[in-house]
Image (cartoon, helix red, strand yellow):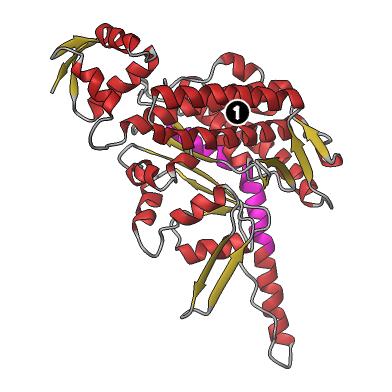
Amino acid sequence: MERRSISEEVYSKLPAELQELTKYFGGREKDIVLLSSLTVLSNCFPNVYGVYDGNNVYPHLYLVIIAPAASGKGVMNKSRILIEKIHDKVFKDTLQKFKEYENRKKVAKEKVSEEYPVVIVKILPANISTSEMYSFLDCSNHGLIIIESEADTISIMLKNDWSNYSDVLRKAFHHEPISISRKIDKLFKYIKEPKLAVLISGTPDQLQPLIKSKENGLYSRFMVYNFDEISPFFKDVFSQETTEVQLAFENMGMRIFDLYYKLIRLQKPIEFLFTENQKKMFKEKMDIIRNDVIVNHSPGFVSIVHRHGLMLYRLAMILTVLRGTEDIHEKEKVFCDDIDFAVAFELMEIVLGHSQYTYNTIETCGLSSQDEEILDQLKDTFTRKEAVEVGEKMGILQRTIDDKLVQFRNKRFIKKIKRGEFKKL
């Protein structure tokens, strides 16, 4: 699978709000802005749910952007503006409760028996302990998001015993119940339906602990966007467009703020649904993708395909809410538009390709029997064309052979001599 960019055809079909945000960007930056904005927005739509595989699921997504330094991935931080107004309001409400509590303590003749107010936020820092994460999730009814542009922060957390919240991330993706008990601290927390979104970016080295987590399943829960192009030009930091971009995100943030509080006030949550035809198309297309992976790729990648089905469903949910912002809070059920279904499916296939590429480049030992057979049939020095011909004889698709050549190079079984020519090591 290739690390494709998102086509202009997809951008032309997006809800107007997303077209407005992305029109200022091009190339990989445009893709990053779209995917990171969708991830942030996944934590902005309370009281919207769907039923997937018999379970209630919410829009929350995980996204990791992997790219070299100075590659433009920093535009991810623009998406933070979309939720900052909500975060500020939630946090200020908490501070007000602190003040009211302290005032009651001062005027009360007897000791105030009520518990000290808890801190409530929408944006969660990555450099926190596991117990702190439980506490924040426990008092957040409508979800949290981790936004981290320096991925080594979260990588360091995952290496420490006191802050390895990998288990929390894995369970929260499916809203599975989580609990923690600490006898010394007299702590017990049980969270029935944790809601968490994650948006992180970094270089391949910074993200190694996450990328290598394919064994425990954390990696499979992330949408992945991976590229290595670096622009040869210095950014025009004084461009008038820079101000326009900031204003566009702030205006969108205000509209999302208004929608957020309309949705919070709902007495009954809104159910998101696929049409019967969309359900049929979903099953047929996912069967094709799954079968291709079983036949032509690593069996370990099948679980990643399954989770990308859920990612597709969540993407469609977010797009549907955005397209119906004017009156969605007045409805009890909303059906996915065919355009949003098509866009969500295209986005899912793109990030699945990026995930496959990244999965193949993870440092592992050894080769599968199929890989060994491919190499055995190739000369010490061979061309890409010859590798493709070997693949055709074995019933392996051309794009799969290209993936395997990348994998062989990263595992140092071959090296590239020149364009289209390789040598076994």
Relative to 278, say whether 386 is above or below: above
Name the quarter where the N terminus is drawn: top left
Q: Nearer the viewer, residue 90 or 128?
A: 128
Q: Nearer the viewer, residue 247 or 101?
A: 101
Q: What predominant SS class does the magenta segment belong to?
A: helix
x and y percentages locating residue 54 in the rendered image = 68, 44
Q: Is residue 80 magenta?
A: yes
x and y percentages locating residue 157 in the rendered image = 38, 56
Name the quarter where the C terminus is drawn: top left
Q: Secondary structure at mark 1?
A: helix
Q: Which residue is mark 1?
A: 244
Q: Nearer the viewer, residue 377 or 362?
A: 377
Please give the name of the residue rendered at 50% of the width and 20% of the height, measured from the top-left corner.
26
Please give the name of the residue rendered at 55% of the width and 32% of the height, measured from the top-left corner.
35
Does residue 419 show up? no
Q: Which residues are magenta?
A: 72-93
Q: Is residue 290 magenta?
A: no
Using a 10 Å C-alpha cutoff, classify the residue at mark 1 as few (fewer than 14 neighbours), some (14 to 19) or many (20 or more). Answer: few
Looking at numbered disc 1 in the image, what kind of residue is underneath it? Glu
**Residue sitting farthest toward the bottom:** 109
Image position of 303 (left or right of 421): right
x and y percentages locating residue 395 in the rendered image = 37, 13
Q: Nearer the viewer, residue 95 or 407?
A: 407
Image position of 219 (left or right of 269): left
Quadrant of the rendered image containing residue 42: top right
Quadrant of the rendered image containing residue 373: top left
x and y percentages locating residue 414 in the rendered image = 18, 22
Count of numbered labels shown in the rendering: 1
